[in-house]
Image (tube, rainbow, N blue to C red):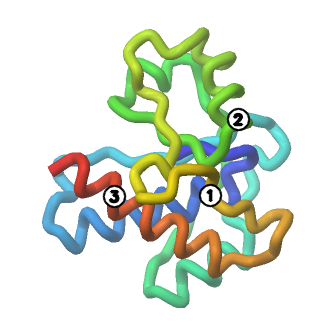
Amino acid sequence: MVCHGNICRSAMAEFMLKDMVEKAGRSEEFYIESAATHNDEIGNPVYPPAKAKLAEHGIGCAGKTARRIRREDYDRFDLIIGMDRANMRNMERAFGGDPEGKLEMMMDYTDRPGEVADPWYTRDFEATWLDLVEGCQGLLESLE
């Protein structure tokens, strides 16, 4: 899961998807992480309103700090999910392209492709939550 700073959308998606696969009894099938495309928030914890939104749903994110994507991440992961078009462009640059077709947009796993609402600008963490629930559910269903 990748977004600009790795303190809102991608971090929420990481812990939301971990929770979903655990509840589905499929944790052994997945290795899930999140990262940033920029250095802006590296080392910072999950943004407090994002953490609070996860907590509202009984999902914790203790110990998570933002990290930047690394070139070797392309080889480590089967799928790398971006939250918006800018993330996709930045990932392609960081990875030197997408020769294996691993880069996907989160909302492409829904009936309404587009970008995940960015709460950093909108402050609407509920809209982001709803986008991510739909995207993560669609992603998980696509992997069954």
Spatial CA span between label 3 and label 1:
14 Å
Q: Earlier in the sequence, mark 3 or mark 2?
A: 2
Residue 48, given in percent of the width and then of the height, sits at 73, 76
- Mark 1 = which residue? 116
Residue 40's image quarter? top right
* Residue most extreme to the bottom: 56
Residue sitting at 63 percent across and 32 percent down? Answer: 88
Badge 2, how many Cα within 10 Å: few under 14, some, many 20+?
many
SS for tag 2? Answer: loop
Badge 3, how many Cα within 10 Å: few under 14, some, many 20+?
some
Spatial CA span between label 1 and label 2:
15 Å
Residue 39, given in percent of the width and then of the height, sits at 80, 37
Q: Quick one: 126 or 69, which is closer to the camera?
A: 126
Badge 1, how many Cα within 10 Å: few under 14, some, many 20+?
many
Horizontal placement of 137 versus 91: left or right? left
Residue type at numbered disc 3: Gly
Q: Is residue 35 shown above or below 53? A: above
- Mark 3 = which residue? 138
Residue type at numbered disc 1: Val
Residue sitting at 47 percent across and 36 percent down? Answer: 104
Label 3 close to label 2 by CB (< 8 Å): no
